[in-house]
Image (cartoon, helix red, strand yellow):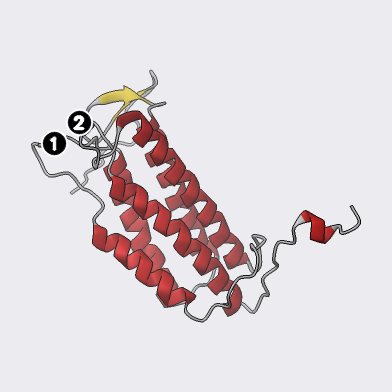
Amino acid sequence: MVNLTRIYTRTGDGGNTRLSDNSLTTKTDPRVDAYGSVDELNSAIGFLLATHRLDEERRDVLGLIQNELFDVGADLSNPVVAAPEWEPLRVVQPSIDRLESWCDRFGTDLPNLKSFILPGGSPAAAQFHLLRTMARRAERAAWVAAEAFGLDTDEQRVEGGVSKLAITYLNRLSDLFFIMARHAGVIDGVDEILWIPGGERNPNV
């Protein structure tokens, strides 16, 4: 149970913060950047839910993802150790499997792609495209942390490492948001606009 009694603490005014294991680090720590990017993504999902009319199925999916993104952030903020005193909150494979099942669910009736899609379409589709890019950015930030501290799958660099499943979750989530962007366009009756490469846009150039 999380118990927040006061929001401002003044403890971070010197540029430091604490990770989930209570270890002190700087606010420029790659792990802090990674879970901060996850928090930003979660807030953008909240904006989508608050400003767009979505059916119950998609709202339920996004609500569960919002909860799981807190798990992802907790995972990224908790350095991996070989024998932790308490079992930490970590992303688990079934959560990734569920993302993949949603990819299949929402992508079943979508037309095959013949080019990249220009982000946009209906308001909901455009917001899903934004979520897609934010998930990719969070994934990249997590990989920066992994390069700095290693992965939990590295035999030689376990102490202080980053959970690989947390990064994988962000990768699949970006895939899901791309599919949901296309799905939203279909529901809203808006045609996709495909990228036309430069030579085809300007054949005489």
**Residue type at numbered disc 2:** Glu
| Position of residue 31 measured from the top left corner of the image (x, y, whole percent) | 35, 34
| Residue 33 numbered mark, or none | none
The residue wearing badge 1 is 82
Element class at badge 1 = loop
The residue wearing badge 2 is 159
Q: Seen in the image, is 188 located left or right of residue 46? A: right
Q: Residue at 25% across / 63% down in the picture?
A: 94
> Can residue 94 be seen from the camera position used here?
yes
| Position of residue 158 measured from the top left corner of the image (x, y, whole percent) | 20, 34
Q: Residue at 41% across / 76% down in the picture?
A: 105
| Position of residue 58 measured from the top left corner of the image (x, y, whole percent) | 44, 72
Q: Are marks 1 and 2 in contact (CB under 8 Å)?
A: yes
Q: Residue at 26% across / 34% down in the picture?
A: 161
**Residue type at numbered disc 1:** Ala
Give the quadrant of residue 8. Answer: top left
Whether 153 is drawn above or below 108: the answer is above
